Image (tube, rainbow, N blue to C red):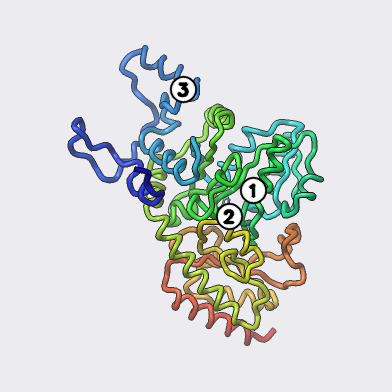
C-alpha cells in the first residue's frame, strides 16, 4: 500500500512495537549521548568499516543515534531524497554544502535573491579561500549561460527568494546545470518539502532551515541537507564527518514534534496570508504584493506549475516614507518586529531598501518594503491590526 506523505509524517520515526518490544512510547525519546558502547572489539571495527563505506551507522555520538536517524528519514521523505545530513543551523547546512563541493579556484553562480547571510559567507569565507561567486537574477536562461565559466562548479539558488518571493524556473535551471555538469543546490526553506519539492524538479541538493516551518514553534535552530544521488551523498557524508557538524538530540526531538503538524500549519499560514494579500490589495498605499500564491503576483503561473502549496510569507511595497513605514511597523500589536519565520506567531520586518539594490527583481522606485510572516492567529484579528496601523501611518505628519 503506497501511503500519502501526510500519513507517513504521522508514522515515520516512531519506536518499534512488536513481540520484542510489547510496550513502546508513542514519541521516540531524545537519545542524548556523546559516545557509543560496543559489545566487542569486533563490533567496533565492523562499525568503522561499514561507516567508511558510507552506511549510516553510529560509531560515535556526533552522528546521533535513533532520534537523529528517525528525523533524517523524515527529512528524506519530505524532500524526496535518499540521505539527509543535519547541521546546527540553516546557515551551517549551507556552509556544509559549499565547503563539501567548492575548492580554491572554483566558481559559483548564485541567484541574487538568496538568503542574505550567503553574501556574508562569500565575502568572509569563500573569497578568502579563493572561491569566486557571481550573483545574477537567474530568471533568464541566456543570462545564466553567459555567466557560466569553465570552473563553475555550483549553481546556488533559492526559489521563491527570501525577500520578494520570486519563483525561479527550477526545471529550466536544472537543465542548464545538467548540460554543463554543474551541481544545482537550492535553499528550500520556503517549501520545506510540503509546498515545493526541488529534488523532484531537477535540483541535486536541497538545503532546508529546519528552524523555520519544520520546527514551527520558534524554539530551535537546525539545518538539513538532502540529496538523492549516490556520488553527491558520498561527498556530503565524508565532509559532514570531517567538519564535525553535530546537532543536539533535544533539538532533533523538537524538530520531529514540529514536523508531525507541518501540513496543517502550512495550510493555515497560507490561507491567512492569502486573505492578508486581498486586504493589502484594497489599500491605496499598496504598490506591489509579493506572494506567489496570490493570483496577481507576477510569478503566480510558475507557482501554479511547480509548487504544491504555499505558506505565510509575503512582502508588500508601500507608498510610504521610511518614517511612515516605521510608524506602521511599530504600531502593529500582533506582529512582533523581528527576523525569521515559520513559527506559529506573526512577525514583521521593515526591509532596508538599500539592500534590495542587488536584487534584479526589485523596482528601485519603490520607497519601502515590509516583510510579513502571517502566523496562525485569527486572520480577522491580524487584518484589524494591520488596518489600524496603516491608518496611523497614513495620518502621520512628517
Ligand atoms: C532562516 C533561513 C536560513 C538560515 O537558517 P538558520 O537556522 O537561521 O541559520 C537559510 N535560508 C533561509 C531561506 C532562511 O529563511
Mark 1: few/some/many CA within 10 Å (<14, 14-19, 20+): some
Whether residues under marks 2 and 3 lie with C-beta atoms below 8 angstroms apart, the answer is no
- Say if residue 125 shows up in the picture: no
Answer with mark 2 or mark 3, whichever residue precedes in sequence.
Answer: 3
Give me the residue at 37% from left, 46% from top. 3
Mark 2: few/some/many CA within 10 Å (<14, 14-19, 20+): many
Q: What count of labels does the image hold?
A: 3
Q: Nearer the viewer, residue 196 or 24?
A: 196
Give me the residue at 47% from left, 65% from top. 269
Answer with mark 3 or mark 1, whichever residue precedes in sequence.
Answer: 3
- Residue closest to the far top: 42
Q: Quadrant of the N terminus?
A: top left
Give me the residue at 55% from left, 45% from top. 200
| Cα distance between the residues tagged 1 and 2 | 9 Å
Q: Quadrant of residue 162?
A: bottom right
Q: Nearer the viewer, residue 151 or 398?
A: 151
Residue holding disc 1: 171
User: Is residue 87 shown above or below 167?
Assistant: above
Residue 91 location in percent, x, y? 58, 45
Marks 2, 3: nearer the viewer: 2
Q: Kindly state the secondary structure of the residue where label 1 is placed.
A: helix
Residue 163 location in percent, x, y? 63, 61
Whether residues under marks 1 and 2 lie with C-beta atoms below 8 angstroms apart, the answer is yes
Give me the residue at 50% from left, 20% from top. 52
Numbered tag placed on residue 196 in the rendering: none
Answer with mark 1 or mark 2, whichever residue precedes in sequence.
Answer: 1
Mark 3: few/some/many CA within 10 Å (<14, 14-19, 20+): some
Residue holding disc 3: 51
Residue 139 location in percent, x, y? 72, 54
| Mark 2 vs ligand 1: CB below 8 Å | no
Residue holding disc 2: 306
Amino acid at each position: 500500500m503506497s501511503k500519502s506523505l501526510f500519513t507517513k509524517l504521522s508514522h515515520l520515526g516512531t519506536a518499534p512495537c512488536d513481540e520484542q518490544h510489547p510496550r513502546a512510547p508513542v514519541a521516540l525519546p531524545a537519545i542524548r549521548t556523546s559516545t557509543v558502547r560496543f559489545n566487542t572489539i569486533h563490533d567496533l571495527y565492523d562499525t568503522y568499516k561499514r561507516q567508511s563505506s558510507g552506511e549510516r551507522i553510529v560509531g560515535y555520538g556526533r552522528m546521533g543515534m535513533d532520534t537523529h536517524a528517525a528525523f533524517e528519514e523524515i527529512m528524506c521523505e519530505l524532500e524526496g531524497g535518499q540521505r539527509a545530513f543535519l547541521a546546527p543551523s540553516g546557515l551551517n547546512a549551507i556552509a556544509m554544502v559549499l565547503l563539501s563541493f567548492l575548492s580554491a579556484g572554483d566558481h559559483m553562480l548564485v541567484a541574487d535573491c538568496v538568503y542574505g547571510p550567503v553574501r556574508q559567507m562569500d565575502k568572509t569565507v569563500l573569497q578568502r579561500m579563493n572561491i569566486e561567486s557571481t550573483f545574477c537574477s537567474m530568471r533568464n536562461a541566456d543570462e545564466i549561460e553567459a555567466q557560466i565559466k569553465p570552473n563553475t562548479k555550483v549553481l546556488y539558488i533559492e526559489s521563491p527568494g527570501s525577500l520578494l518571493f520570486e519563483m525561479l524556473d527550477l526545471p529550466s535551471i536544472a537543465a542548464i546545470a545538467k548540460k554543463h555538469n554543474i551541481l544545482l543546490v537550492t535553499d528550500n526553506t520556503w517549501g520545506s518539502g510540503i509546498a515545493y519539492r526541488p529534488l523532484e524538479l531537477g535540483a541535486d541538493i536541497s538545503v532546508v532551515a529546519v528552524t523555520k516551518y519544520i520546527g514551527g514553534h520558534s524554539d530551535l535552530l537546525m539545518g538539513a541537507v538532502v540529496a538523492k544521488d549516490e556520488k553527491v551523498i558520498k561527498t556530503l557524508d565524508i565532509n559532514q564527518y570531517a567538519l564535525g557538524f553535530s546537532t543536539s538530540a533535544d533539538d532533533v526531538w523538537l524538530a520531529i514534534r514540529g514536523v508531525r503538524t507541518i501540513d496543517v500549519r502550512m495550510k493555515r499560514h497560507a490561507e491567512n496570508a492569502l486573505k492578508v494579500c486581498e486586504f493589502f490589495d484594497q489599500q491605496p498605499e499598496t504598490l506591489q504584493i509579493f506572494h506567489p500564491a496570490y493570483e496577481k503576483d507576477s510569478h503566480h503561473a510558475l507557482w501554479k506549475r511547480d509548487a504544491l502549496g504555499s505558506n505565510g510569507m509575503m512582502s508588500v511595497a508601500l507608498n510610504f516614507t521610511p518614517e511612515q513605514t516605521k510608524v506602521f511597523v511599530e504600531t502593529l500589536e500582533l506582529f512582533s518586529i523581528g527576523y525569521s519565520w515559520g513559527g506559529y506567531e506573526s512577525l514583521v520586518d521593515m526591509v532596508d531598501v538599500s539592500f534590495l539594490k542587488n536584487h534584479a527583481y526589485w523596482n528601485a522606485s519603490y520607497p519601502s518594503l515590509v516583510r510579513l510572516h502571517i502566523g496562525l492567529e485569527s486572520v480577522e484579528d491580524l487584518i484589524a491590526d494591520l488596518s489600524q496601523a496603516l491608518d496611523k501611518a497614513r495620518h502621520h505628519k512628517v
